[in-house]
Amino acid sequence: MKQISSRDNPTFKSLHSLVENAREQRQRQQTLIDGIHLLEVYRQHAGMPQTLLLAESALENVGLMRLAEAFSGVETLCLRDSLFRELSGVAAPTGIAAVIAIPPAHDRAPTQTCVFLDAVQDAGNVGSILRSAAAAGVSDVLMGTGCAGAWTPRVLRAAQGAHFSLNIRELLDLPGVLKQLSMPGVATVVTDAVPLYQLDLKRPVAWLFGNEGSGLSAELLAAASLRATIPLAAATESLNVAAAAAICLFEGLRQRS
């Protein structure tokens, strides 16, 4: 087990760069997952990580060391607690993390209900939408430019393992992709739209969710076949995009069921 106790350590610098930079994650096709739950979900869906990371204090935790034994044969690094906390990005990390290979995305055109994310910038929102999509039985999530990186640690934490049951594609020309699909695009908007519960969602649709502040781009909105709105109480202007996505996705699931 290799010990890392300095921020000047080249391995730590490489790990820090991987955690902080979505572009580097895409270039290296690697990311970092943090915590017991994500490690166990990854092992269930994808197998062994490339590198296991342990905080020094984890060496005294019987449960964590038992989990670490399940990854015998994997390169293991032991980091000073402050360095591990810096990589984790949370105030009280569990003490175990791993570097994993990002699963390759399939370029196939979706044939079932799918999700388009248009410049959704907040990592928590992106992760929550991925989690809702997986729970609602959606397989494909297509992301345009301006979105938070799908494989950043913050998005991974918010999605809680949903990544590993989804086909996620990033940096796409969303209007161009939508025009090639044989299903209608449903733009989620606040006004001038059909109430969600009046739509026929038994057929496959492409849900279009936009930026937290400005909504969908004009080009993607123009490419949509339908516009949907969620009926709200009179004193309410709008919903958080992740909440709106969950409502739409589960109304679709309800109708299909």
Image (cartoon, grey):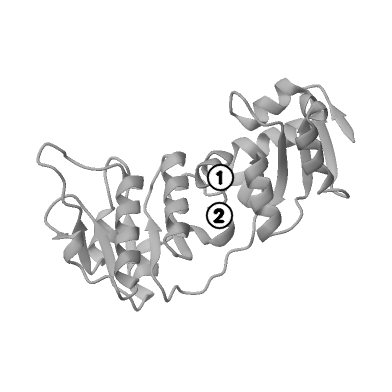
Considering only vertical position in the picture, is 204 above or below 52? Answer: below
**Label 1 close to label 2 by CB (< 8 Å):** yes
Residue 44 image-quadrant placement: bottom right
Residue 36 in picture, x, y percent from top left: 67, 41
The residue that mark 2 highlights is 163
User: Can residue 29 be seen in the rendering of this structure?
Assistant: no
Q: Residue furthest front?
A: 62
The residue that mark 1 highlights is 156
Viewer-nearest residue: 15 or 159: 159
Residue 174 image-quadrant placement: bottom left
Residue 179 in picture, x, y percent from top left: 33, 72
Question: Residue drawn 63% across and 37% down?
Answer: 19
Question: Residue drawn 79% across and 45% down?
Answer: 51
Query: Quick one: label 1, few (<14), some, or many (20+) residues within 10 Å?
Result: many
Residue 163 in picture, x, y percent from top left: 55, 54
User: Can residue 251 be seen in the rendering of this structure?
Assistant: yes
**Looking at the picture, which amino acid does disc 2 mark?**
His
Q: Quadrant for the N terminus, please.
A: top right
**Looking at the picture, which amino acid does disc 1 mark?**
Leu
Residue 139 in picture, x, y percent from top left: 48, 66
Q: Quadrant for the C terminus, please.
A: bottom left
Residue 54 image-quadrant placement: top right
Tell me the element at label 2: helix
Considering only vertical position in the picture, is 38 above or below 90? Answer: below
Left or right, 121 with respect to 158, comes to: left
Left or right, 107 with respect to 231, comes to: right
Question: Residue drawn 52% across and 43% down?
Answer: 155
